[in-house]
Amino acid sequence: MSSFSTLTDAELVRRCRAGEPGAWDELVERFSRYVYAVCVRGFRLEEPDAEDAFQEVFTRIYTHLDSLRDDSALRPWIAQLTRRVCLDTVSRGKREQQTENPVPEDTPADLDAIEEAFTVREALATLPEQCQDILDRFFARDQSYRTISEELDLPAGTIASRIARCLGKLRNELEGRSEPTSESRE
Amino acid sequence: MASESYLDLPLDTLLDRLAAPGAPGGGSAAALTVAFAASLVAMAARCSEGWADAGGVAAQALAIKDRAVALARADAKAWDRALSALASVGPGGDPRRDFELEQTLEHAATLPLEIAELGADAAMLAAVASELCDGAHRADAVVAAALAAGGARAAAHIVEVNLGVREGDALLARARASRQAAAEAAQEALDSGR
């Protein structure tokens, strides 16, 4: 874990602008999965196009970071940039191939799901490690109560309640988050 | 009909399909029983406004339900393959064919094991719900525990009788432990519901 990994998005943006070594790497690390997921799952880009779009998004972020009006709105700004780049890629592909290749109708729903998944992931990262671990085991790795109980050396009968309490903390964290209001001029 | 789509059928047609020869069979029925149980737990939790952990219990129940439905589909496909493999067995020994058959059967046993473990989870969650949910829905939670234990017991039986599983296999021990855990949780729920 880098020294930047605990920074808020706004603090990270300020460090990137100041050119602090390691800040840009952290920004890429923090958002690379998200950008790639939008390219591949949201817009169904093929591998080479997805990689080009990925590079283009981070080039634009690097070039236009100064135009971000609200540093805390980094993620919605990156989301907007990524969508534009993906739409450009899709349009370019249609022109070049002269074939029907519309963006799938379920794209907005997919994008919402990706947004939601990353919001949950961010909120999850703020929970105590034990909570992160037990929620990951049950919901992401599909482990049974028995397996969790054995691997964490906890009574099996308490696992469901522990998970429920951790979910309560996650809900509180998600409910405490406010939607960013402004993005950028880009 | 392909096993991928049979869960999209209306309930009465699905039951007719279950009554017909071939897949889906007992494993899928056990998985669906666990799914029914998990859905009941989710309902009991969602109807319990005064219970602080209700949301967390409902979320777990829905996750179990989704897994059970996926297992019902997967088991139908695996059973189909196992039936085909058994039907292809002819007279005389063919080591390679016997090995492939054993692999197919062993795979067919891992899914009922997962169903048994999921049934145990559903029963334990139902036991928690039967104790803490709103009184008006306690009976639903108790029914869920009983159904889940039934699903776990049925799935554990399928593991026990699978030709690819031998006494002493870890699979068998886990299946039996799940059956036991589910039965204890269901008994706890039944006792608390009286």
Image (cartoon, helix red, strand yellow):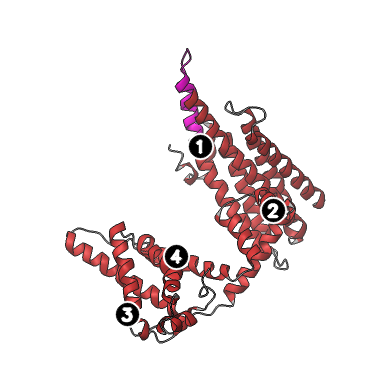
Residue under numbered circle 1:
B76
Disc 2 and disc 3: Cα gap in Å? 52 Å
Q: Amino acid at mark 4?
A: Ile
Q: Nearer the viewer, mark 4 or mark 3?
A: 3
Q: Which is more toward the observer, A163 or A110?
A: A163
Q: Quadrant of residue B171?
A: top right
Question: What is the crowding at mark 3: few (fewer than 14 residues within 10 Å), some, or many (at least 20)?
Answer: few
Q: Which residues are magenta?
A: B77-98
On whether disc 3 and disc 1 are found on a single subunit, the reply is no
Image mark for residue B125: 2
Question: SS class of the residue under badge 1?
Answer: helix
Answer whether residue B46 is visible to the viewer in this image. no
Q: What kind of element bears circle 2?
A: helix
Question: Picture coordinates of residue A167 (x, y %)?
Answer: 63, 65
Nearer mark to the viewer, of 2 and 3: 3
Magenta stretch: residue A52 in it?
no
Chain bearing mark 4: A
Where is mark 4, residue-wise?
A114
Instruction: Name the kind of residue labelled 1 in the image.
Output: Ala
Is the Cβ of the residue at disc 4 closer than 8 Å to that at disc 1? Answer: no
Q: Which residue is mark 3?
A: A63
Q: Residues within 10 Å of mark 4 (few under 14, many from 20)?
A: some
Amino acid tagged 2 = Leu
> Closer to the camera, A26 or B7?
A26
Q: Which quarter of the rendered picture does the C terminus of chain A lie within?
A: bottom left
Taking the view exactly as shown, the residue that stands out farthest to the front is A21
Closer to viewer: mark 4 or mark 1: 4
Distance in Å between CA atoms under marks 4 and 2: 29 Å
Say which of marks 4 and 2 sits in front. 4
Give x and y (percent) for residue A71.
Answer: 45, 84
In the drawing, does residue A158 fall left or right of residue A36?
right
Kindly identify the residue that appears in the image at 53 percent across and 38 percent down: B75
